[in-house]
Amino acid sequence: MNEKQYKDMKYILTSTMRTKLIISIYEKSKNLEDLRNELEKPSATILHGLKELENLNYVKKLNKYYSLTSNGYMLAVNMVKLIENWYSIDKNKVFWDNHSLEYIPESSMKNLYQLKNAECITSTNNDLSKALTTYINLISDCHALKIILPIFSEIHLNKIIELSNQGKLTNLELITTPEIADSIKSKPLYSNALKDNENVKISILNQNTNIYLTVCDKFMSMNLFFKDGHFDDSQLLLDESEEGIEWGNNLFEHYINTIINP
């Protein structure tokens, strides 16, 4: 972003009226009466804001209706994304604040707006296993799973094997570290059920990760590590929306590109 773009963006975002006008007209062209009813502001205030935006070539007027110019449309798209990113972060700020984010790539961080429907499932003193139980119930209803596995957890692996043996889980794409893969290989129960299973594809990372990601066609979930390096199974970020699942798939694909062997 050059200096002019920065100043223009700052100019828009430091005014509630200018920001509301851009977003309102982004939805569809509107006349003064439409804007007055929607924004509940006097005509003079709205017209002043519109004139400022016209001078910047973000808004144009045709037959008493105001619409965005091409520049205004591009600005609005990025403003909406920025606002939704803020909303997504603020909605689950405890989850983001509590954990290390170093292994979430920049591309995923830029698209946090896709997680605006996500909810943080948190274990409580009255239900210490709430997050884990929620996760187990979720994967029990999936036929195909994509998992980034950064820990060796018998609880999680045993459930995956159980679902596979029952014929409920028919496809598993597992990305893990060399250390976790070696641990799976060293234990016949897991090696026979996972490594030697034609319905399971295990890929080995060439880097560390602290993201426990699970994606299927019904949900995306993620556990992270505390900033001190310990895995946190008490908070689960869950998103069952199409956008959230897309975010999870994109993160999974990012790690597919960092594997040692497919």
Image (spheres, rainbow, N blue to C red):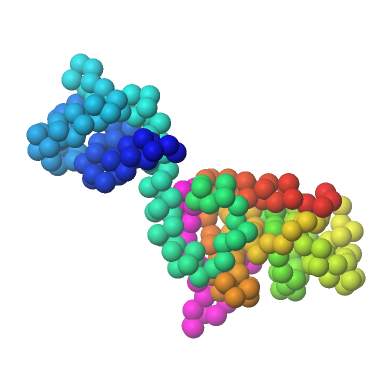
Q: Using the image as rendered, state which of residue 205 and residue 217 is in the foreground.
A: 205
Q: Give the residue at x 70% y 57%.
A: 147
| Nearer-the-camera pick, 130 or 70 | 70
Kindly give the residue lying farthest to the front in the view shown: 3
**What are the residue bounds of the magenta stretch?**
113-136
- Lateral position of residue 170 relative to residue 244, left or right: right
Please say whether residue 48 is visible from this viewpoint.
Answer: yes
Say which residue appears at 9% left-offset and 38% top-offset: 42
Question: x and y percent of residue 157 in the render?
Answer: 75, 68
Residue reaching furthest to the bottom: 125
| Snapshot quadrant of residue 129 | bottom right
**Where does residue 193 sit, x and y in percent of width and height?**
85, 63
In which quarter of the view is residue 2 placed?
top left
Is residue 81 left or right of 38 when viewed as pictured?
A: right
The answer to whether one can see residue 23 in this image is: no
Q: In this rendered view, identify the residue nearer to me: 9 or 119.
A: 9
The answer to if 133 sits in the magenta stretch is yes
Name above or below for residue 140 compared with residue 48: below
Where is 77 relative to 208, above or below?
above
Rendered-image quadrant of the N terminus: top left
Seen in the picture, residue 189 relative to 166 is either above or below; the reply is below
> Residue 231 appears at what percent x and percent y?
63, 73
Coordinates of residue 40 in the picture (x, y in percent): 14, 42
Query: Magenta stretch: residue 214 in it?
Result: no
Q: Between 26 and 4, which is closer to the camera in this rendering?
A: 4
Q: Residue at 19% of width from left, 28% of height from top?
A: 51
Please tell me which residue is depicted at 90% across the width and 59% down the height of the picture. Answer: 196
Relative horizontal placement of residue 72, taking residue 134 as reference (left or right): left
Residue sitting farthest toward the top = 63
Figure disc tally: 0
